[in-house]
Image: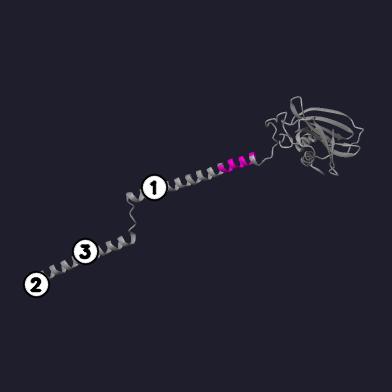
Amino acid sequence: MTRTSALSRSTVRGIALSALVLGLAAGCGADSGSDEAPAVEGPGASEQEDAGAADDDTATADDTASDDGASDDGASDGGAASDDGGEAPAAGAAALPEDADLATEQLPITAEKAVEIGLDDVGGGELVQIEIDHDDDVWEWQLEIVDGGRQHDLDIDATRGEVTEHDQEDDDDQDPAVDVTSPMPYAEAIEAALGKEPGRVSGWDLSSDDGCIHYTIDIDRSSGDDDVEVEVDVETGEVRVDD
């Protein structure tokens, strides 16, 4: 073998070895990149995460505000229901004029409410008489309540519901108890009286006479004649005009 041939072979081997080394290096680099190539976060990714977090916070705040608003609305509605849902007496309402017709107009303090106020003021007992009329420029309920052998006479303002007078004395009469709702409501008694004597109802009374309970309806005759009293028996419904 000549020197030139040996040199040529040596050169070829060197080139081949270099190519092999380069190939191996390239292969290792590719594998390393494949195994460990973490996703590189660019600026855009970081900004998107921050924006997403901000959106979540905003949504939470909006939801909270919405919930708070609903709670406030509920509280407001509840208050309105309480204001409207209650059946408070119409105390303090405009007073009826002196010439009001009790057959068609209702006093701010009804008969039922006046009885309730009277019994509460006395602390119990039984109603034995109730009357409504216009006295001293005001509509006034006058009640007689008996409790434990004591008679309580009360005056109640029919507009404000205020007890303006309360007197007491021993009771020896033992009158029967009366009820403005049973067995005959006062509205029914007024209707029966007007069927006998048309006119304006200026007052009425519920009491007993010799154990007979009856209404006495005061009527201003529409004909312009003198006033008349009409008695209505609560048990029989009998109507009698007392001239």
Give the quarter of the figure containing the N terminus: bottom left
Q: Nearer the viewer, mark 1 or mark 2?
A: 1
Please report the residue visible at 81 percent of the width from the left and 43 percent of the height from the top: 184
Would you say the magenta stretch is mainly helix, strand or loop?
Answer: helix
| Residue carrying label 1 | 51
Q: Specify start and end residues of the magenta stretch as a single range.
A: 73-83
**Callout 2, which amino acid?**
Ser
Name the element at disc 1. Answer: helix
Name the element at disc 2. Answer: helix
Give the quarter of the figure containing the C terminus: top right
- In this rendering, the answer to whether 51 lies above or below 175 is below
Along the viewing direction, whichever of 108 and 3 lies nearer the viewer: 108
| Residue carrying label 3 | 22
Q: Is residue 55 magenta?
A: no
| x and y percentages locating residue 87 in the rendered image | 69, 40
Along the viewing direction, whichever of 242 and 155 lies nearer the viewer: 242
Is residue 149 rendered to the left or right of residue 139? right
**Callout 3, which amino acid?**
Leu
| Residue carrying label 2 | 5
Between disc 1 and disc 2, whose residue precedes?
2
For the residues labelled 3 and 2, the Cα–Cα distance comes to 26 Å
Is residue 210 rendered to the left or right of residue 33? right
**Callout 1, which amino acid?**
Ala
| x and y percentages locating residue 36 in the rendered image | 33, 59
Dividing the picture into quarters, in which one does residue 236 lie?
top right
